[in-house]
Amino acid sequence: MSTNLSIIGTSITKFGELWEKSLVELMTEAVTEAVRDAGVDPEDIEAIFVANKAAGSFENQLHLNALASQLFPHFPPAVHIEAACASGGAALLAAEHALLAGQYKTVLVVGAEKMTDVSAEETTEILASAADATRQFGSTFPALYALVADMYLRKHALTSEVLATIAVKNHRHALKNSKAQFRKELSLEQVMQSAIIAPPLRVFDCSPISDGAAAVVLTTQPHKAKARVAGAGQGQDAMVLADRRSLTTFRATSTAAKQAYQRAGMKPADIQCAEVHDCFTIAELLAIADLGFFPEEKAGRATLQNQTTLGGKIIINPSGGLKACGHPVGATGVKQVAYLAELVSRGEADRVLAHNVGGAGSTAVVHILEKAL
Amino acid sequence: MKPAAYWRQSKTWQQWLGRTGTVIASTSIHLAPPQLAAFVPYSYVIVDFGNEKMEFMGAGQDELRVGDEVVCVLRKLCVPSDEALIPYGIKVVKKAEA
Amino acid sequence: MKLDGKSGIISYGASLPVVMITTEEIGHAHGGDGTPGKQLGVKQKTVASLDEDAVTLATAAALQALTRWSKFQQKKSAPEDIQAVFIGSESHPYAVKPSGTIVKQALGLGHVMALADLQFACKAGTQALQITLSYVQSGLAKYGLAIGADTAQSRPGDILEFTAGAGAAAYIVGSDVSQVIAKCLGTVSVATDTPDFWRRPGQEYPEHAGRFSGEPGYFWHVRTAAELLLNELALKPSQLDYCVFHTPNAKFPQAVAQQLGFTPEQLAPALIVKEIGNTYAAASPLALAAVLDQAKPKQKILVVSYGSGSGSDAFVFETTAALTTYHKHLSETVRQQIERLKPVSYQTYQQSHAGKH
């Protein structure tokens, strides 16, 4: 990428069941901290990109861009970007495009979601809006991923133990993440004996329902930076699984990844760690192949052989992923990039990748970050 | 279901009713939105009809497995409230052995 | 009324739920045993799932009739030619909005259509058949579709719980001589204001009047309609091959058959009530379908339904040579559907059965 896109400020709130914090309070917290972390004046923020999936459904709030803008004395222009669970990644892309076009020099991206005020059944209903109700009536988000898991496990002669391994690993990673919703180890037995949600997926195969927010400040100006955006890409696929060419790969992911690698001038082997979209454990299994880290036939075995954790070939979801960190839907894509930027700035890695997916793989956004110049 | 949405959707029933296919992926739903809670657990499958594939709910308490021959039937899509329009739609059942 | 025998049944279909509950299981749930079931002569009854109702069962039965019609004609049936649809039930899902339009929409019939829902307790299905025959006979419609369908309701603990079942049967009626498999030789109906069974709007379950349902209800109306029609057609029971009477249980039809002079053999194929219970507006239509499934050409069938409130529709059908060809395309007969019924427990029955129509 010729223009230098730097991440100069980041912030992630605690993720969890945050009764005391409203959506606006979460946004405010993330925004304030990211601007402070960037070391810029609030007036330097020329535009805001807000990522959120379902405030319209959760609390009948659909003018989030205005809510975000009024947090600044100069009311910068703001837009709300929505792409289901890929809202965060999509908002980042929109911000980057504006910067690359020279429209702005310094912008803020904030992702936020408040999910825990309603019941689990109501949340299931709201999240099912990522599907096509006219052709997928009666489906739930877990059920769509369960269909993928059903095909995948049969195709590769794997059992749900490989899925449980991912849950256990991500929970272990989250022990080091003070912002994670869950900071407790899980055992394989606990995962494999938890209540069935949609076979083969059980409760502990599913990322939780969470509140939270994250924000990053991006600039093309020379400034002390935490990391730079080396490349990014976006891909799509059919919403109805039955319309897809394959049920064991997410074409949206591989398309997005190809674009990102090409723009960054990198290959999968260059990536040292990645935050991938493990909304369900099966999603991580597909992701590590679709992103090019392992061939599809080897992804399961690699996971079982601890190749995706410390000491392995590549660290997948060092933050704990969606599974252990939590998945406040609109915040996740921004949190992934914020987390990785912080990781790079601490010198723990030089080249990292964030993978954010919407729906059951209908939208995917990939970001590649590298050490700041 | 809104009346207009029901009406548009009802025009698609006839193209599916009676068609047979094979289940190629299956799961069942144990946690569902409130309007579908009464049916839990119900099957949710991908069916291959030969020239196309489609996703459907399984009818009644039918437990559908990969490889099952199924046929499309008209059923209630959810149990509506006492005053609501009844949403009918297409689900699949296991085909009876000849 | 004697008819010219030109109009009649050209195709039929039947649909039953896939599960049933035994009367023994119900008896145990009531704190007793299987005695009530034995007294009624009913072993088991069908149970509709939560996502089934009179409309979905009617659709399945009508689809079977349409599919068989296509195969029998060896060309795609022209659904637009069906220009009359009448459907009788005691469990229409709506008090206002017809079941018939939902069924015809699912089947892809045309919009040039005379259509209404009927209610007359257990004779609503046969009344639908008679009306449809009249539409075809008079030339108002080239083909018509008549359906009897019910997911019968009964109060838990009530004696009706042992017999109230679910099912549907559909008849396509026409007057093309090459297609008619059972021509209607004549039909007559009787109706009086006899309050043996009723349900007020908003009530979930019906009320019934005990032994009053017997002689003043069922027996008088069935006998009267049967005798009127047989006299008009100058037919004696011995000249008929089968008789079909409404089946609130197995005992009533057995008794009325004997009173009218029919033999147990003539009645036997129509006693599917023993295995499916009383399917209310579908009862006589389903019993006729079971008889047609195994009838031969040139056989005469008397059908007399009974609907509380009260009335009876009587028909005499005579099967034609076309029935042999038609039978070649039969699958999923009434007997086959009965054979695949699986039992459920009383708990499952309570949770899943469409007791609320």
Image (cartoon, coloured by chain):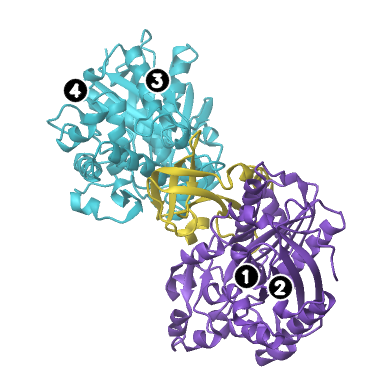
Answer few, some or many: residues within 10 Å of disc 1's Cα (few below 14, many 20 plus, some between 14 and 19): many
What's the residue type where badge 4 is placed?
Gly
Give how far across and how far down residue C116 sits, in percent: 78, 60
Give how far across and how far down residue C151 sits, in percent: 60, 68
Report which residue position mark 1 lands on: C287
Answer few, some or many: residues within 10 Å of disc 3's Cα (few below 14, many 20 plus, some between 14 and 19): many
Colour assignment, chain B: yellow
* Mark carried by residue A347: 4
Report which residue position mark 2 lands on: C303
Judging from the image, mark 4 belongs to the subunit labelled: A
Q: Earlier in the sequence, mark 2 or mark 1?
A: 1
State how far apart marks 1 and 4 are (Cα).
Answer: 82 Å
Answer few, some or many: residues within 10 Å of disc 2's Cα (few below 14, many 20 plus, some between 14 and 19): many
Asked if disc 2 and disc 1 are in contact, CB closer than 8 Å, the reply is yes
Q: Quadrant of residue C234?
A: bottom right
Judging from the image, mark 1 belongs to the subunit labelled: C
What's the residue type where badge 1 is placed?
Ala
